Amino acid sequence: MDNASGLGPAPDSHLPPGLRTPLRDDAFVRSDDEKIAAISDHFEAIMHELGLDLTDDSLAGTPRRVAKMFVKEWFKGLDPANRPEVRMFDNRYDYHQLLVERDITLFSCCEHHFVPIVGKAHVAYLPGSHVVGLSKLNRVVQHYARRPQVQERLTRQIAEELKQSLGTDDVAVLIEADHLCVMSRGVNDTSSSTLTSEYGGRFATDGALRSEFLRQIGK
Ligand SMILES: Nc1nc2c(ncn2[C@@H]2O[C@H](COP(=O)(O)OP(=O)(O)OP(=O)(O)O)[C@@H](O)[C@H]2O)c(=O)[nH]1
Ligand SMILES: [Zn+2]
């Protein structure tokens, strides 16, 4: 199914239904510039309601700044056009051991409170006939992080994308993250953090392999 604009595939159509980020069918009918203009107006209304003086020269640009940040940075992973191309190379080195990309910087946004989730992702796979360009692992993490998220879905989206792109189920993903909604409000707990993981293929069945992955990421 194409998206409503007819410009390409529907967002997340390559993922199982339960793993797709909930989006309206017409999510990409409007251009980024149109979205920025509309969000800017809405955010201005929020600031106005809070009693802020929008004529102040420090505040005047904030609605547009926030709108641009949402569309072009924090939530750019919603747009399927930004899905990274994962380039594979012939495994002519015959490397078939564990490959771990650890401590990948992770910035996401809690979909319940729209405040940041900050942490690290660790991913691993067992190469077969092809190996992946390392930076693509970081790019996959970033693509799914740059959306309103819950950590469980983020973890599974990354794992599923890696399985499909790398052509193997032998994939592991572990995310450790701090949720600003837990730290800065509500329970106001600044010391707890959240760990989620997904193990596919041999990582699911081979305890020694899983332990080696955990050892290599310092867990
Ligand atoms: N499972 C899960 N829950 C999350 C995530 N991020 C935030 N939450 C939780 O989402 C829940 C929303 O619960 P509500 O009771 O509707 O919201 P709330 O009244 O703001 O809850 P408090 O945070 O307890 O004040 C909270 O318990 C959050 O901690 C996440 O990534 N995964
Ligand atoms: Zn939250």
Image (cartoon, rainbow, N blue to C red):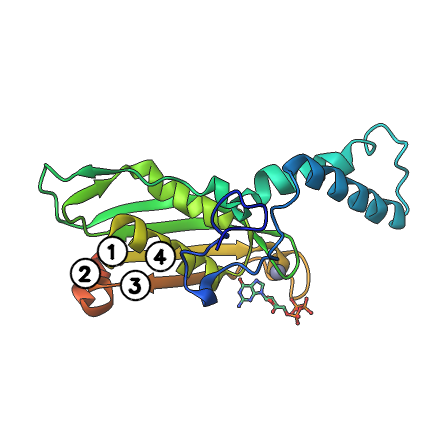
Q: Residue at x 66, y 58 (%)?
A: 113
Q: Position of residue 123 (x, y in %)?
A: 32, 51
Structural distance between the alpha carbons of marks 4 and 3: 8 Å
Structural distance between the alpha carbons of marks 3 and 2: 10 Å
Labels 1 & 2 near each other (Cβ < 8 A): yes
Label for residue 159? 4
Residue 98 appears in the rendering: yes
Label for residue 45? none
Quadrant containing the C terminus is: bottom left
Q: Position of residue 186 (x, y in %)?
A: 68, 65
Disc 3 marks a residue whose amino acid type is Tyr
Structural distance between the alpha carbons of marks 4 and 2: 17 Å
CB at mark 3 closer than 8 A to ligand 1?
A: no
Structural distance between the alpha carbons of marks 1 and 3: 10 Å
| Residue picked out by circle 3 | 199
Disc 2 marks a residue whose amino acid type is Leu
| Residue picked out by circle 1 | 213
Mark 4 against mark 2, which lies toward the viewer? 4
Left or right position of 38 against 31: right
Residue 217 appears in the rendering: no
